[in-house]
């Protein structure tokens, strides 16, 4: 019988998990100041948020980076930026998580090059590169290359890390965004494990690692998960994850070492569940979600980062992040949580729920395996369509009241919140940051050794074409002053650029027939006035890849009888306007969650005027502060929707009314 089943069950406190906050914004210098302040307050590890140009392999002066520099993370364009970002932080003593995927090999190269400059012992470096490309195609959208070369890059970093920085987790399978994209607990389990299998099979097939060392590869695989508000189910999900991961290790990869078979994971609790309405309630949600991943010792997270209470409103301030940090510290140091063995061992209720989740997850895993694995299930659109469908059901349960969210669809009456009442309730990024970053980037290119950078890029290209490990030439490119955009463009030229399936076309229509019928009638009436079906173009300008909302708008628009045109993520304003012109769109909807709405919407409206399409109503949705919503309206935007506007069918009726009014205005003008 394991010791944890023998009394006494109380002991000296276990060490707490790694305590992190996910942070980075504006500039490397400002982010460095934030990191050092958080570390001084008791944070025990770093979790770096990169801005969208960095995540998608663009320099700050690329057209697609307009309005995005420094908005949702820190821009890192070259080794100089990495130096500024981590100035005064000894990397040999730090545990650093980097949420970076498609260009993970590049950011890891920059990090290691900086560690070498600090004379750090590479073998002492600890941390994680997320490096999970499959979930980017499914949920988050910061992919660059097609799946197979992307998985090759992941395999390259795993093999290189095993030899050079063996304490580093080169792969962090991320189910966090799968849940945000709609995954049920069993889908989150199955899709994440299928993802891990695809990576491990790829590493094994590459042949860079001796078979006797494959157990080390398995042991360095970590996971990054989401914990939602149904914390009993989430707790059981984590226990199921551990059981299934051990099962896969033993049966598929013949791993026998108990330590290597441990399920190792970090967590950020569910930002999707944070509400714009009554945002002070988010503190309780965050606490309950943190309990889901800390209460059960045998399924406890190795690292935890908590969102701030006001992230549904905008970028949290330093004080807001401190509040979340203190929650973790109170849980770890004031309670007796860490003094006990697993308080759920032996529970019949927990065991039954865990078994049920494992049964459902095994069935989904078997289905994916029968399709040929995660890559085939991804490229066919199967996995994405399942997420879009699950998310549709989740949204509809909120709309019809089957699922309660306090302050949103239940107990909505509220006194004014003093926390959210002031004008400086969230942090804003200075509009001059992007210009300054671009000027610094140009100065960096001018100062570096140009021929050395060109030679490093040529070697990088050759390695990619020849199938060699990408890490050694990436390190040389980092030292030569190559930029993020140059590294990624070199590999785009070899591998090509990819556009993932949207999953929208395969999703079933809404089940809320009674609610849909009046809007369908309205759409039919307006379509008759137009002489053809009302055409609604949904566009995602810029680099924001969080497409869940746009996908649900497209699905519901189709359900009420509109012609929904949705081409996926990462479009320039010019491409959106060209698509609107080609489709003869009657209304344009722009979805932007990265904070770049003012710049991008201004560009779209200007191009519409230039094309003579300024009579087409434009609506905008995203995380948009009230002052910015007013500015958008003054620019000419017809409607602004934020997370509080969750009744999508009502929104579709509003869209139809806008088009009807526009038709009436055009008729009056013609007379």
Image (tube, rainbow, N blue to C red):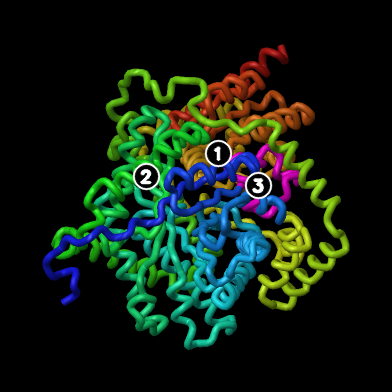
Q: Horizontally, is 321 left or right of 375 in the view?
A: left
Q: Can you give x and y, in whole percent of width and height, for residue 494 in the image?
A: 74, 67
Q: Residue at x 40, y 34 (%)?
A: 275
What is the spatial separation of the Cα atoms under label 2 and label 1, in whole angstroms? 20 Å
Of the residues tagged 2 and 1, which is closer to the observer? 1
> Which corner quadrant holds the C terminus?
top right
Q: Can you give x and y, in whole percent of width and height, for residue 283 in the image?
A: 34, 36
What is the spatial separation of the Cα atoms under label 2 and label 3, in whole angstroms? 34 Å
Q: Which image quadrant for residue 325?
A: top left
What is the spatial separation of the Cα atoms under label 3 and label 1, in whole angstroms? 17 Å
Q: Which mark is residue 370?
A: none
**Above or below 6: residue 579:** above
Q: Which residues are magenta?
A: 51-75
Q: Residue at x 50, y 67 (%)?
A: 169
**How many residues crowd mark 1 within 10 Å: few (<14), some (14–19), many (20+)?**
many
Q: Which residue is mark 1?
A: 593
Task: Judge whether residue 513 is colored magenta.
Answer: no
């Amino acid at each position: 019988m394991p010791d944890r089943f023998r009394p006494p069950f109380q002991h000296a406190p276990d060490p707490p998990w790694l305590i992190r906050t996910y942070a980075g914004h504006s500039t490397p210098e400002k982010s460095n100041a934030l990191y050092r302040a958080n570390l001084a307050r008791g944070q025990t590890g770093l979790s770096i948020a990169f801005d969208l140009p960095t995540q998608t392999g663009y320099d700050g002066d690329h057209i697609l980076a307009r309005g995005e520099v420094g908005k949702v993370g820190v821009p890192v364009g070259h080794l100089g930026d990495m130096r500024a970002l981590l100035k005064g932080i000894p990397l040999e003593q730090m545990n650093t998580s980097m949420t970076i995927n498609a260009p993970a090999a590049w950011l890891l190269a920059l990090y290691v090059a900086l560690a070498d400059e600090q004379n750090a012992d590479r073998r002492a470096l600890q941390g994680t590169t997320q490096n999970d490309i499959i979930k980017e195609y499914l949920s988050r959208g910061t992919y660059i290359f097609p799946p197979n070369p992307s998985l090759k890059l992941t395999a390259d970093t795993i093999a290189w890390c095993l030899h050079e920085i063996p304490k580093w987790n080169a792969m962090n399978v991320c189910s966090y965004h799968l849940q945000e994209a709609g995954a049920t607990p069993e889908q989150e389990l199955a899709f994440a494990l299928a993802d891990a299998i695809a990576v491990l099979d790829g590493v094994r097939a590459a042949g860079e690692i001796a078979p006797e060392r494959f157990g080390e590869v398995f042991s360095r695989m970590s996971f990054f998960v989401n914990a939602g508000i149904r914390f009993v189910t989430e707790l059981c999900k984590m226990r199921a994850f551990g059981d299934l991961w051990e099962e896969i290790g033993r049966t598929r990869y013949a791993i026998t070492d108990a330590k290597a078979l441990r399920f190792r994971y970090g967590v950020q609790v569910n930002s999707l569940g944070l509400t714009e309405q009554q945002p002070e309630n988010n503190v309780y949600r965050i606490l309950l979600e943190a309990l889901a991943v800390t209460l059960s010792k045998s399924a406890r997270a190795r690292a935890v980062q908590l969102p701030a209470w006001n992230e549904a409103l905008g970028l949290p301030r330093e004080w807001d992040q401190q509040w979340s940090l203190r929650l973790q510290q109170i849980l770890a140091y004031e309670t007796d949580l860490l003094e006990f063995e697993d308080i759920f061992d032996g529970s019949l209720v927990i065991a039954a729920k865990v078994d049920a989740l494992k049964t459902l997850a095994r069935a989904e895993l078997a289905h994916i395996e029968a399709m040929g694995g995660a890559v085939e299930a991804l490229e066919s659109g199967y996995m994405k369509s399942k997420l879009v469908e699950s998310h549709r059901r989740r949204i509809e349960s909120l709309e019809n009241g089957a699922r309660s969210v306090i302050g949103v669809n239940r107990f909505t009456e509220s006194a004014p919140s003093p926390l959210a009442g002031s004008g400086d309730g969230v942090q804003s990024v200075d509009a001059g940051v992007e210009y300054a970053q671009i000027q610094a980037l140009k100065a960096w290119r001018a100062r570096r050794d140009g021929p050395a950078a060109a030679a490093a890029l040529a070697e990088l290209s050759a390695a990619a074409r020849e199938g060699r490990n990408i890490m050694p030439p990436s390190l040389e490119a980092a030292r030569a002053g190559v930029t993020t955009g140059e590294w990624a463009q070199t590999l785009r030229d070899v591998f090509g650029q990819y556009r993932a399936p949207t999953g929208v076309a395969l999703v079933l229509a809404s089940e809320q027939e009674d609610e849909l019928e009046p809007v369908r009638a309205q759409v039919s009436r307006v379509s008759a006035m137009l002489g053809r079906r009302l055409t609604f173009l949904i566009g995602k300008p810029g680099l924001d890849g969080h497409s869940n909302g746009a996908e649900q708008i497209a699905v519901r628009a189709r359900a009420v009888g509109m012609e929904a045109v949705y081409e996926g993520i990462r479009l320039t304003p010019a491409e959106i306007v060209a698509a609107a012109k080609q489709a003869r769109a009657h209304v344009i909807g722009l979805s932007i969650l990265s904070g770049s709405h003012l710049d991008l919407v201004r560009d779209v409206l200007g191009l519409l005027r230039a094309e003579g399409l300024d009579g087409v109503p434009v609506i905008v949705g995203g995380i948009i502060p009230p002052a910015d919503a007013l500015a958008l309206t003054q620019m000419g935007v017809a409607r602004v929707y934020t997370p509080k506007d969750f009744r999508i069918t009502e929104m579709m009726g509003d869209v139809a009314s806008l088009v009807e009014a526009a038709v009436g205005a055009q008729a009056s003008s013609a007379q």
